[in-house]
Amino acid sequence: MWQLEIHAGGGWAAAVAARLRERLAAHPHVRLCLPTGDTPAPAYRELAAAVARGETSLARAEVVLLDEFGGLPPDHPARCERMLRRELLDHVDLPEDRFHHPDLDAELARFAGVVARGGLDLAVVGLGANGHVGLNEPGSTRHAPTRRVELAPPTIERAARYGDGADPAPTWGVTLGMAELLAAREVWLLVTGAHKAPILKRVLEGPVGAEAPASLLREHPRLLVLADEDAAAQLAPSTAPR
Ligand code: PGA
């Protein structure tokens, strides 16, 4: 079962932040996984501003990083951990010991154990232009575990954009698996921009399958798709009544 919410471009970030605030108010200990990238950044700015105004708090929440690129130095700007700190965590009151992120290969078992122990209340994910979720690239099944993955060529191109352009782009990464994401109590898929319209249509209206791993989220009992008008522009009226 899934639900679709479409917001005007200018109001999308505030709407997502408002929903996060609702969850934090209802469940201050919420355990959520958060993505990085261009999509969530404006929503994180709204949320950080609300924390600064004293309207919400992450002091008792727990945050799990959705994915991480491999082979980059610890302070590299394209590392997802650095991005999430820059875009959100440096500006809110989440205690450091309540932020879980995978570091390197050797660390992956520890990270997977942390996720498995408590599970996730809420998995917030973005949508890759190739249908990936986290770094679950096309071909990932619903049983794919938290693991090391080789990146698909479009993801390598995206990763290069997140960096300063000086270093070789990562070719591998680690990601929460489809299995862990589908086991979350609730999943939110964030999608913005006209460039995501074709893949959002494919994910919501095409067949459910590993060729577009995000489509597997439709099997989750509580999936909320939070799209802006540009991303939703190609959806059929039966998917998105106008
Ligand atoms: P983006 O990345 O938010 O930067 O578009 C999404 C993704 O590739 O998962």
Image (cartoon, grey):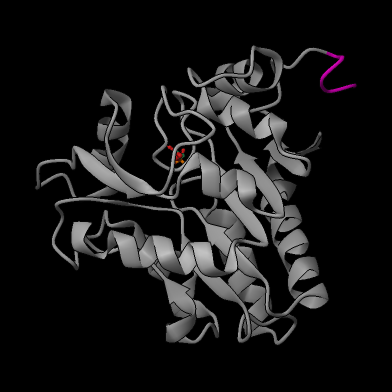
Ligand 1, seen in the image, is in the quarter at top left
> In the rendering, at what x and y percent does residue 18 appear?
77, 62
Q: Classify residue 84 as left or right of residue 228.
A: left
Quadrant the N terminus occupies: top right
> In the rendering, at what x and y percent does residue 181 appear?
57, 47
Residue at left offset 72%, top offset 57%: 14
Q: Is residue 185 above or below residue 168?
A: below
Quadrant the C terminus occupies: top right
Residue at left offset 45%, top offset 69%: 114
Q: Is residue 165 above or below residue 65?
A: above
Does the rendering let one see residue 82?
no
> In the rendering, at what x and y percent does residue 102 appear?
33, 62
Q: Quadrant of residue 151?
A: top left
> In the rendering, at what x and y percent does residue 17 appear?
70, 61
Q: Nearer the viewer, residue 112 or 225?
A: 112
Q: Is residue 55 above or below residue 167?
A: below
Q: Classify residue 36 as left or right of residue 26.
A: left
Residue at the far left in the pictured view: 167
Residue at left offset 48%, top offset 28%: 141
Secondary structure character of the magenta stretch overall: loop
Q: Which residues are magenta?
A: 237-242
